[in-house]
């Protein structure tokens, strides 16, 4: 469906239905927010109409739906008031109620079901405002959130959201989606999850936090120039069961790799297979005449809310995340066992425990955060003693519950990340985003690699034994019930 054209119909700002109280007009970022790069975080939800029903039966008038979405968004912004503000500087938000940028668009020539039958990931950015995805925010005065609702002639629609990562992580975005959808369904106020903005008091910001300790500074070491390619691979329940058996089989009964999760085994397989692809194309180190594979570091985003003692509420807004880092040095990737990689992943994540979360709180938190950043930098420098190190950044959106986001016309049939632009040259890092399949027992892997490495990965039989390509979200096994 490469001929799909998304036409912009209107643009406006949706303001909160009630003004933000004076004592909340300035929202300070937290210490953990300071760690995050100033990029927009994308999320796209797809709501098709059943192909055998009339649009008016399922969705009613598109204009009526539009008004309901905008009204409920306005009401939702009253409690999510920072989103309706503008950046004041790099440490605070002016909660001035200017509103969220809201775009309405339409697709006349294509049914959403047709598009989802063979989704072209290179076109998904058209469902986001300005066609952006993981793009850098514009600094002071820039909007914190932008929304686009795209209506298809068949009655289906797509909701695309961009929110500043400096104020929301994935869990916070999920809370916003759920609250907006609940208001759109006219859910009683007492049953709608209310956000809290306690992060700045739990993790006070600090002028002493050095710029060189931020994640963007860390990632800059691994920026690559070239053509970045996005591919979506699906691991269904059967593939994941096989991966779990494989990981458990090559470890002892007392090993910490027993009973691995689907995210762990999919991460381990992708890590191993990308290492193979990178080694095939990268110059190898010569050590005493023997060729040696370059070390590879991965990071995995960890939600600190559930690691605090007692746990923080999932409705806490802001960034409650840190990167767990693991490294494989000087071994052939083909020889690595899946179970050993699962153990490395678990050990890295296990370090981010309740004690770490507690040490990051209060006025002394900045000291601990600097220590953790230096530790990650030391891991990088010790692994790359000769300056050569490959990197893969992992993020998991699994178990977020986004397939339950119902605005009143049914649950989404798909949620997606976004593809990269088809520019011949761009700056990028190797990255992987993991999301749920609609059946919730599978995993979709959105992989961002250089063109050559991706071509090698797509031909790796060990990878393709578990990963399906060109898998439609409408196919059996990718959703709980037939649409």
Image (spheres, rainbow, N blue to C red):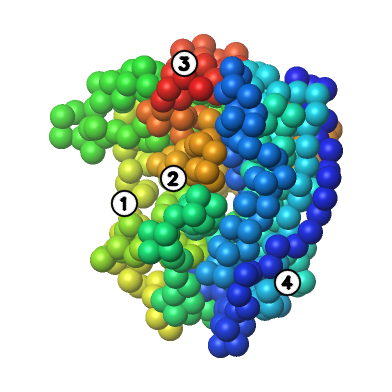
SS for tag 4?
Answer: loop
For the residues labelled 1 and 4, the Cα–Cα distance comes to 42 Å
For the residues labelled 4 and 2, the Cα–Cα distance comes to 29 Å
Please give the residue where the numbered disc 4 appears in the rendered image.
98
Q: Quadrant of residue 267?
A: top left
Please give the residue where the numbered disc 1 appears in the rendered image.
350
The answer to whether any part of residue 414 appears in the image is: no
Residue found 54% across the figure and 52% down from its top: 184
The answer to whether any part of residue 326 appears in the image is: yes
- 3 or 2: mark nearer the eye: 3
- Residue 426 disc label: none
- 1 or 4: mark nearer the eye: 4
Residue found 53% across the figure and 78% down from its top: 205
Please give the residue where the numbered disc 3 appears in the rendered image.
476
325 or 160, which is in the foreground? Answer: 160
- The numbered mark, 3 or 4, whose residue comes first in the sequence reads 4
Task: Where is residue 415? Give x, y as percent.
Answer: 55, 36
SS for tag 1?
Answer: helix
Please give the residue where the numbered disc 2 appears in the rendered image.
400
Q: Quadrant of residue 14?
A: bottom right
221 or 480, which is in the foreground? Answer: 480
- 1 or 3: mark nearer the eye: 3
In the picture, measured across the screen, residue 317 lies left or right of residue 339, that is right
* Marks 3 and 2 close (CB-CB < 8 Å): no
- The numbered mark, 1 or 4, whose residue comes first in the sequence reads 4
Looking at the image, which residue sits at the far bottom? Answer: 23
Looking at the image, which residue sits at the far left? Answer: 254
Counting every numbered tag in the picture gives 4
* Marks 1 and 4 close (CB-CB < 8 Å): no
For the residues labelled 1 and 3, the Cα–Cα distance comes to 36 Å
For the residues labelled 3 and 2, the Cα–Cα distance comes to 21 Å
Considering only vertical position in the picture, is 189 above or below 257? Answer: below
């Amino acid at each position: 469906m490469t001929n799909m054209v998304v036409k912009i119909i209107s643009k406006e700002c949706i303001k909160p239905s009630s003004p933000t109280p004076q004592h909340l007009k300035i929202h300070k970022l937290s210490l953990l927010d300071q760690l995050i790069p100033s990029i927009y975080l994308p999320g796209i939800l797809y709501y098709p109409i059943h192909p055998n029903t009339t649009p008016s039966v399922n969705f009613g008038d598109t204009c009526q739906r539009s008004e309901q979405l905008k009204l409920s968004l306005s009401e939702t912004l009253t409690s999510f008031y920072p989103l309706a503000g503008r950046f004041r500087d790099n440490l605070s938000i002016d909660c001035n109620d200017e509103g969220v940028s809201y775009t309405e668009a339409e697709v006349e020539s294509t049914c959403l079901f047709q598009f989802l039958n063979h989704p072209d990931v290179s076109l998904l950015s058209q469902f986001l405002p300005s066609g952006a995805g993981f793009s850098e925010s514009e600094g002071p005065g820039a909007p914190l959130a932008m929304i686009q609702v795209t209506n298809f002639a068949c009655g289906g629609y797509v909701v695309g959201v961009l929110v500043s990562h400096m104020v929301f992580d994935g869990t916070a975005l999920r809370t916003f989606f759920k609250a907006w959808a609940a208001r759109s369904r006219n859910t009683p106020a007492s049953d709608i999850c209310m956000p809290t903005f306690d992060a700045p008091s739990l993790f006070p910001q600090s002028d002493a936090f050095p710029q060189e300790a931020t994640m963007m500074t860390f990632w800059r070491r691994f920026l690559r120039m070239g053509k970045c390619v996005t591919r979506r691979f699906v691991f269904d329940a059967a593939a994941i069961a096989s991966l779990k058996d494989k990981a458990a089989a090559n470890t002892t009964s007392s090993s910490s790799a027993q009973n691995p999760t689907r995210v762990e085994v999919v991460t381990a397989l992708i890590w191993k297979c990308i290492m193979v692809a990178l080694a095939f194309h990268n110059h190898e180190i010569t050590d005493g005449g023997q060729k040696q594979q370059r070390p590879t570091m991965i990071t995995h985003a960890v939600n600190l809310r559930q690691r605090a003692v007692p746990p923080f509420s999932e409705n806490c807004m802001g960034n409650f995340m840190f990167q767990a880092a693991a490294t494989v040095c000087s071994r052939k990737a083909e020889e690595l066992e899946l179970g050993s990689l699962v153990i490395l992943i678990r050990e890295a994540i296990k370090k981010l425990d309740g004690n770490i979360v507690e040490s990051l709180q209060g006025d002394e938190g900045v000291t601990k955060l600097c220590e953790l950043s230096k530790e990650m930098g030391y891991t990088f420098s010790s692994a790359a003693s000769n300056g050569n190190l490959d990197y893969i950044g992992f993020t998991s959106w699994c178990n977020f519950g986004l397939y339950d986001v119902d605005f009143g016309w049914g649950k989404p049939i798909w949620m997606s990340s976004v593809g990269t632009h088809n520019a011949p040259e761009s700056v990028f890092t190797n990255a992987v985003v993991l999301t749920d399949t609609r059946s919730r027992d599978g995993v979709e892997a959105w992989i961002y690699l250089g063109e050559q490495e991706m071509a090698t990965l797509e031909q790796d039989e060990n990878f393709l034994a578990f990963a399906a390509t060109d898998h439609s979200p409408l196919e059996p096994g990718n959703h709980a019930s037939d649409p």
